[in-house]
Amino acid sequence: MPDVIQPSSRSLRGLDWLNFFLADVQTGVGPFLAAALTARKWNPQQVGFALTVGGLITIAVQGPAGAIVDALRKKRMLIAVGVVGVAVAALVFAFGSSMPLIVSAQVLLGGVAPFLGSAVTAITLGLVGKQLFDARLGRNNSFNSAGNVFAAVLLGGVGWYLGNRALFLTVPVLAIPALISLGLIRPNEIDYLRARGARGEGEPATVSGFRTLLADRVLLGFACATFLFHFANAAMLPQLGEMLARGHTRAAAPFMSAAVTVTQTVIALTAVWIGKTAGRIGRRPLLLFGFGVLPIRAVLYTFTNSVPLLVAIQILDGVANSIFVVVSTLVVADRTSGTGRLNVALGGLAMAVGIGGALSNVVAGSVAQKAGFATSFLLLGGIAVLAFLTLAVLVPETLRGRGVGTGFDE
């Protein structure tokens, strides 16, 4: 039977604005942290270490977080706890400067972060069903990126006029509308079996064992490509922030704001189209294009010291990330349809993202410290080429009715 869902406009509106304000909350403690620590005279290796700690905690929590999101009916509660945790971490970043305090905040941030994206994805699928998931996921990411743009502009201005401490103090304020938006989503409209990737309406719900995921060679290949993509990608924006902050301490936040704004504007303008296009032409062509622009971006960073040009190159970051954040979730949803293990699989993919991101920051930070930023960017570009080749060889089309060996009945 078709998966037909008609959630209320109130719940859908709440989901829209939840994505918007969650982005506001998370942007305040994400890209700006590297620039803020640089302004406090931390060197690239120290910045890389601090960023890596949060990444390692996230890696450790991703798998259990996915299982908890699948199993727990109170998914809205998980998001509420996560938002409060991010706000507390921001307060520590505002008032703390020592390594132990910053690391403690990163541990907290890394611990709550895995629950936020996974729970929002689960609630989305539980509300709209599989048939509408492609387009709705694109809409989620458009609102999320619009929120990132708003936060980047707001926080950049706050950082310029009031300093980095005020920037982080803005995050708890932005947490309030995020929690209000969460409250608009009616829990009785979320199908919790559908939210974990069980069968559609009118079909028996099934929950497969974890071995089903481990035996899926396409999922494993995609995880490898994802790991390499984020190994190449994760350190680029923080290192750009460090480059822009050198010798321009007061301008660090506005520079980073401009870079984030360009990236997120591209995502906001393209995510809905990408979601719809992925449902029409398939996942693989979009992924290949998104992976393909990453090495180009890395090389371009080495050609100029012009701030406007460096910020303009972030258009490529927006293209690559818009495709990845939308289409990667669709690939996992395709491969896990009917298993009841959607969020566990998303947690596994997020682990690949986290491992790649953690290694990216630590390796790129060390290389930049010893050989300069240009060498670091070229290294990251080489890894990006390897990510593209891995995707091309190991990941076929996963959309139902397209490609070979997708795991679906054709």
Image: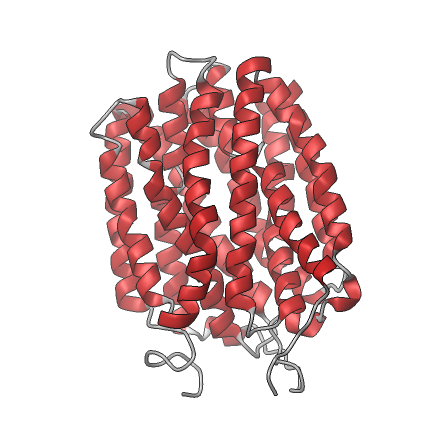
- Could you tell me residue 121's position as x and y percent? 60, 60
Considering the image in quadrants, where does the C terminus appear? bottom left
191 and 73: which is toward the camera? 191
In the depicted structure, whether residue 304 falls above or below residue 226: above
- Could you tell me residue 367's position as x and y percent? 30, 30
Q: Is residue 387 visible?
A: no
Answer left or right for 369 relative to 137.
left
The number of numbered discs placed on residues in the rendered structure image is 0
Answer left or right for 373 relative to 57.
left
Q: Is residue 326 visible?
A: yes
State the colouring used for the structure image.
secondary structure
In the depicted structure, whether residue 18 falls above or below residue 34: below
213 and 399: which is toward the camera? 399
Considering the image in quadrants, where does the N terminus appear? bottom right
Q: Residue at x 20, y 29 (%)?
A: 303
In the depicted structure, whether residue 389 falls above or below residue 53: below
- Could you tell me residue 190's position as x and y percent? 72, 67
Q: Residue at x 57, y 54 (%)?
A: 62
From this viewpoint, which residue is outermost toward the left? 303
